[in-house]
Structures are given as structure tokens and as C-alpha cells.
Amino acid sequence: MNNFILYPIIIPFLFAGILMFFPNRVYVQRIITTIALLLTVVASIYVGLRVKLKGVLSITLGDWEAPFGISMVADMFSALLVITTSVIALFVVLYSFPSIGIGREKHFYYSGVLFLITGINGSFTTGDLFNLFVFFEVLLMASYLLIVIGGEKVQLRESFKYILVNIVSSSFFVVGVAYLYSVTGTLNMADLAVKIPQVEYAGMMTTIAILFLIVFGLKGAIFPLYFWLPGSYSAPPMPILALFGALLTKVGVYAIIRSYTLFFTMDIGFTHEILAYLSIATIVIGCIGALAYFDVKKIMIYNIVIAVGVILFGASQLNESGLQGALYYLLHDMLIKAALFFLIGLLIVLFGTTDLRKMGGLMKTKPVFGWFYLIAVFGLAGIPPLSGFVGKLLIVQSGFEGEHFWGSIIVLATSLLVLLSAIRIFIYAFWGEPIETKQIANVQYKQLFMPAALLVGISIFYGIGTEWLYPYMTEATNILQNPSIYIDAVLKE
């Protein structure tokens, strides 16, 4: 039995429920949450190793065989995402201890984080489209709590937009699921991959594929559906912003890649062409936003939008370079975005503002902080040999191998704009004459800096350890290129 593939979902879910019984015991909550996430990291790594050893693993819940029961599937693509999610969640919790505030900690903050991880890991692991909707709702309900926790005016204002957009998205999701089931008679992803090519009405399937692109695009923040993200993500405290920025949009990106490589492949000349154009538009609009603001939060939030476009451009090419590059860049972006939001959070604590024009001179007083930020920025822009280089190189190569060489040129050109947008923060905040900063305890400074430094260290290893990671990336890419491997593993009964 492959029950262990459920552990990265069950562990945070159970501990989240336990924490709800004593919300005022803050230090106990911290300890239990840390233990829960350490166990989740260990379980997710174990799942990844078993997938590497045995190939795609699946389990069908209940007494029904696939495709009638609810299938949970772990392949290398999902396993790598679950591992990365669990590691980032652990670092976010460690970063939260000195920064989130006891008031929020007493209002089910840690339960919210663990329920969010339950939904994210479940979304990456499910093999059933309706179950994907269920896990989306789990993570969304947890995010509703986290985005308003603390009750600040800006949080309450932006939460209305965030909740409304996701209600609309979920409604479209249900409509899409209903249409798909009415045409194919199944929602099992592997079974959909078998039955969709047999459907006579190709136009109807193309329409459903575009409907799901709208659904997942709203959650992933692709152009023109990104409008809700900058305001909503800038409202909550930095640990929550880091969690959202590193993980939430990636669930939408994962859903697009999974569906557009596994079962929505009947009209790639239309659906994937639209995806390629939208991804380039997403990159361009993200660059405009990142350069337009002097608010450090907004600059980095628009860099989330840019990364979504880069990843999906690679995936839309449907060749080995594009899919492998998309996976490399997806994991890189999750790590580097969390690290950069941690570092920016420390900037905001020190200067007491998000306005770049009111910062300066930090390199003279805290040079180590400055160097770590600079390394993270170079990784974000894809400077070799850091973590963003290999993924972006492969994505650019994929465009030149296919028909979208113009897209690769835009990706290369906008890499300079990404670097410029992040270097602006370095020039304003770290260069020049020192501006008086708030006095914070040395212990608190180290507690805020160390999670960021460790994540930057992991991203450096990710970049220079590309050769070591190559077999895992190749296996994940092979499954995306050859859906029959996934189908056979799920429907083997």
C-alpha cells in the first residue's frame, strides 16, 4: 500500500486541529507547529525518495478502484513541489516567531498556516479534478483567515477583493467540472487523459480547456487576471506575504501545467498558443509594475507576476527544454521569493517604512545583510551559477527550439528589468549615507535574518548543485512529456 503519500497532507491537518484547542498557549503552539512541519518535511522527503525508487505511486481511497474512487498520486513533479512547500512553510513559521505578534498568534495563526499547507500539499498530490477543487477550497479558507488576522484596516479592505475574486474563480471551477463530467463521465485525471481524445466534439473540449485556464489563471495571477494580487498580497504581515508569495500562485501554475500536459492536449495549436501569448503579456505587465513603484512590497509582488509568466512560457512550449526549465524555475522561484520577502521584511522593521526613498546606508552598518540580499537578487535575475540561471536558460532555449523565438527574446530582455527592479532596492536601502534605523534587540535581528540567510544558502546550493538535481528534474519532465507513465500508474488495476 502507498498510504505514506498521504502523510504530508495528514500531518499538518491533524496538528492544525490539535492547536485549535489551546490558542492562548503561544509558546506551546510554536513548539507543536515546528514539530509538525519538521515531520511534514521528513515525510515529504521520504515520499520523494520512494518515488525516485519505485516510480509514480498512487492510492485510491475507499473500496472503489480507479477511476471510480478518489485517487491520490505522487510523481516526481508533485513530490518536488511538496518537499519545497514543506521546507518553506517551516522557515515561514520560524520567521513568524519574532515578527507576527502574539496577538495574531493567539487567533489561530499557526492552525491557519498548517491548514494552508494541508490544502497546498493536497492540491499537488490529488489525482482527481473534483478533489483538486476541494483542496483549493481548504487552502483558500485558511488564506481567508490569514489575510484578515490582526484586523488592520488595510487587511479588511483588501480581503473583500481577495475573497470576491476567489469566490468567482471557485464558481467557474464548479461550472468547468460540471461541463467536463457531462462530456467525459469522469473526473479522474488519468482517466480524463484517456477519454478526452475519444470525445467527438473537439470544439467543446477546447472551450472547457480555456475555461479551466481562466480558473487556474485567476489563482495563478496571469495576465489579465492578476489585478487582485498586488493590493491583496501587500495587506497582511510579512510572514503571511512570504507564505502567499512563495506558494499560493504556484498552486495555480501547477494546475495549469498538470492539466495542459496530461489531458488538455487535443488542440495545442490553439490552447497552448494562447497560453504562450498570455505568459509573455504577464511578464511584460509584471516588469512595468515592478519598475513603477517605490514601495518595496509592491516591487517584489510584481516580481511574483513576472515569474508566473516565465514559468508558463516554458510550459507552453511542450518540449523537453521548456518543461524542464519550467520545473527548475518553479522550484527556484518558490525558494528565492520566500528569502527575498524575509529580507524585505527585515528592511521594513529596521526603517519602519516600505518607501524606498526613506531608506539608505544599510551596507555600512549591516554589510552581511546587504551581501545576502545582493546574492538573492542575482539569483532572482538568473545570474550564473545561481538558482535562477539554469531554469531561465532552458526556457529561453525552448522558445528558440520551437516557434516562439520572439518570446525567448522578451524573456531575456525582461531579465534585465527584473534585475533593475530589485537592484533599485539595494541602491536605495543599502547604498548612500546611513539613515537612522529603529533599534531592535540583537536576538530579534538574528531571528529575522537567519531564516532568510538559510533560504538564500539553499538557493545557492540549488544553483551549483544542478548536476545532482538533474536526474530528479529529468524524471519529472519525462512524466509530463509522456502522460502514459502517469496513466498506467493510476489505472493499473
Image (cartoon, rainbow, N blue to C red):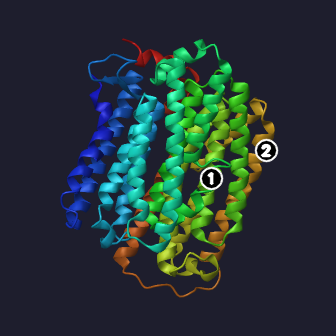
Relative to 415, 255 lies left or right: left
Q: Secondary structure at mark 2?
A: helix
Q: CA distance from mark 1 to mark 2?
A: 23 Å
Residue at point 53% right, 42% down? 252
Check disc 2 and report the residue beneath it: 409
Residue at point 61% right, 37% down? 213
Q: Nearer the viewer, residue 293 or 359?
A: 293
Residue 196 drawn above or below residue 7: above
Residue 254 drawn above or below residue 87: above
Mark before the other along the chain sequence, 1 or 2: 1
**Residue type pointed to by label 2:** Ile
Residue at point 66% right, 19% down? 202
Relative to 440, 268 lies left or right: right
Q: Nearer the viewer, residue 462 or 17?
A: 17
Check disc 1 and report the residue beneath it: 226
Relative to 182, 5 lies left or right: left
Q: Quadrant of residue 67?
A: top left
